[in-house]
């Protein structure tokens, strides 16, 4: 850590001209007439000030670190989602890393013109109308 | 001005269609699948013990979406609105979000997707659940009906002003939105632990932490191409991937071959050079809208996708594959999913399934 900052943290501020310290809180050259509480109280106040300076510094550094960490987290999760679905974005993230899911060696689905499972034909046989429904067996060839 | 509001009860928590567990070969990932919304829904999770909770949460999402936005359920909220012939409506939060996503997609794609194509699809014969369409009807289709235009709708919060005669179809975004909602709901049920993949008819959203190197996903024209040379295995680390194709949901009318991706400007099925487009985006609603827009854009698809900044895999009618915007050429490589959503921002602010 910077020495100047160290000094600034640990040092008490100087009294400026015109400022009047409260009884018992004066500068060291103005000893309390009673001679007793002055120096020890001043030491206590200095200690408290030092502690609060360090506490404030720790809070500032901590808040800064948290902000950076949160910003980093937001960027890494939000980037793949730009303009697309949240669910598919999660998929994209995993796919980009090439990990997470199982190995799949065989086709699991077919994209094609939509197959129709039943067709109907009307024929006239011996003057009678015959309607036939033909069911096509779905093709389970994906394996 | 009279305002109308459909009274609905909340999703029924007790009823759940059975899920069928799928063995993929990876013991650390559990996968299940079931019929939903006229197609297949699939859920993959890790750790495996999260599967039951995830499937339950996805059930709630799918049931709610069907109740809100299905054109083919007479008791759905959107059918109730159509039955009123236009006016001012107070929508449920879920349908308001779905309409808002469809409008955002229309704005983003410059009208290549448009929620007002309901009448155009009906005129082509797509007037009921696809499974119930007569595939070989001899009647020719009615005259094409261009979409009235998404600008004719007014959505303010949950208040929708629908012009008389306009019918909505949210097909360009609803499945993607459903996958987004399902993935988030499954993660919520798993208390944000592990990872989840939700697929609705091939539109896939992932959430949470993916497997190492990303979720292994196959890109293909149709579901039955898996394992063939036309399919490609990629890794999805996050976001979503979706595919639109004119190879599926086709039917005939009076000798004409029709499909379900309609150009809002003409009211006819899109007839560009690409039969299938796959893209990746931050949300499945974005990816779903982009793939539909690219099919409709036709010759302009590559330019539009480049402007949108999306990686894409395009398959021509001759089977030629073109990869754009960083979509990997090699099998097993990760798809670079761009950040940011243009269509569905709800995932940023929503706290639970709608």
Image: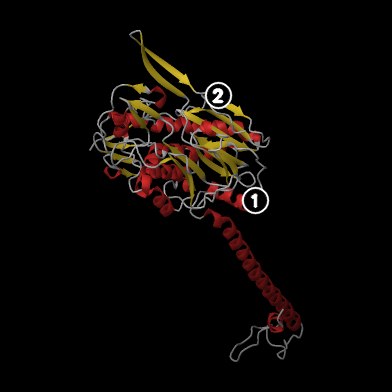
Residue annotated with mark 1 = A98
Task: Choose mark 1 or mark 2, whichever is in front.
Answer: 1
**Quarter of the view holding residue B208:** top right
In screen coordinates, is A139 left or right of A47? left
User: Of A6 and B73, which appears nearest the observer?
Assistant: B73
Quarter of the figure that contains the N terminus of chain A: bottom right
Residue located farthest toward the top when viewing the structure as drawn: A126
Residue B18 circle label: 2
Which corner quadrant of the image does residue A49 belong to? bottom right
Number of callouts in the render?
A: 2
Residue B217's disc is: none
Q: Where is residue A130 in the image (x, y as percent from the top left)?
A: 38, 12
Q: What element carries label 2?
A: loop
Q: Do labels 1 and 2 share a chain?
A: no
**Residue B207 location, x and y as percent?**
56, 43
Vertical placement of A78 versus B96: above or below? Answer: below
Q: Which quadrant does the C terminus of chain A fall into?
A: top right
Output the chain of dot 2: B
Q: Distance between the residues labelled 1 and 2?
A: 34 Å
- Residue B260 visible in the displayed image: yes
**Element marked by disc 1:** loop
């Amino acid at each position: 850590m910077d020495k100047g900052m160290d000094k600034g943290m640990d040092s008490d501020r100087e009294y400026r001209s015109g400022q009047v310290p409260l009884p018992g809180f004066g500068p060291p050259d103005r000893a309390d007439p009673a001679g007793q509480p002055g120096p020890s109280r001043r030491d206590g106040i200095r200690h408290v000030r030092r502690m609060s300076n360090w506490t404030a510094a720790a809070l500032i550094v901590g808040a800064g670190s948290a902000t950076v960490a949160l910003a980093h987290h937001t960027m890494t999760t939000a980037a793949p989602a730009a303009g697309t679905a949240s669910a598919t974005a999660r998929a994209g993230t995993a796919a980009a890393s090439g990990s997470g899911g199982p190995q799949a060696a065989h086709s699991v689905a077919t994209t094609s013109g939509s197959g129709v499972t039943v067709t109907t034909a009307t024929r006239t046989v011996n003057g009678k109308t015959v309607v036939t429904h033909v069911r096509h067996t779905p093709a389970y060839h994906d394996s | 001005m009279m305002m109308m509001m459909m009274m609905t009860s909340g999703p029924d928590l007790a009823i759940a269609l059975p899920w069928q567990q799928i063995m993929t070969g990876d013991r650390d990932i559990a996968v299940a699948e079931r019929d939903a919304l006229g197609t297949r829904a699939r859920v993959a999770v890790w750790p495996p013990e999260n599967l039951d909770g995830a499937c339950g949460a996805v059930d709630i999402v799918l049931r709610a979406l069907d109740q809100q936005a299905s054109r083919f359920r007479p008791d759905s909220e959107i059918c109730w609105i159509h039955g009123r012939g236009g006016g001012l409506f107070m929508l449920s939060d879920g349908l308001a979000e779905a309409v808002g996503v469809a409008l955002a997609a229309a704005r983003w794609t410059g009208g290549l997707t448009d929620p007002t194509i309901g009448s155009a699809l009906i005129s082509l014969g797509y007037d009921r659940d696809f499974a119930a369409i007569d595939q070989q009807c001899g009647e020719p289709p009615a005259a094409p009906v261009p979409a009235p235009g998404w600008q004719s709708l007014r959505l303010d919060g949950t208040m929708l002003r629908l012009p008389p005669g306009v019918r909505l179809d949210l097909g360009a975004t609803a499945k993607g939105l459903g996958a987004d909602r399902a993935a988030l709901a499954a993660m919520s049920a798993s208390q944000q632990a592990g990872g989840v993949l939700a697929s609705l008819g091939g539109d896939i959203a992932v959430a949470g932490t993916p497997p190492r190197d990303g979720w292994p996903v196959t890109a293909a024209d149709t579901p039955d191409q898996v394992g063939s040379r036309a399919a490609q295995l990629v890794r999805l680390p996050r976001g979503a991937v979706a595919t639109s194709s004119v190879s599926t949901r086709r039917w005939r009318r009076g000798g004409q071959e029709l499909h379900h991706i309609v150009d809002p400007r003409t009211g006819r099925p899109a007839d560009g050079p690409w039969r299938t487009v796959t893209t990746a985006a931050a949300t499945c609603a974005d990816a779903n809208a982009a793939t539909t827009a690219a099919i409709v854009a036709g010759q302009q698809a590559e330019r539009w996708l480049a402007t949108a900044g999306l990686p894409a895999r395009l398959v021509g009618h001759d089977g030629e594959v073109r990869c754009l915007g960083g979509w990997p050429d090699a099998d097993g490589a990760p798809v670079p999913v761009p950040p940011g959503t243009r269509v569905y921002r709800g995932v940023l602010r929503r706290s639970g399934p709608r």
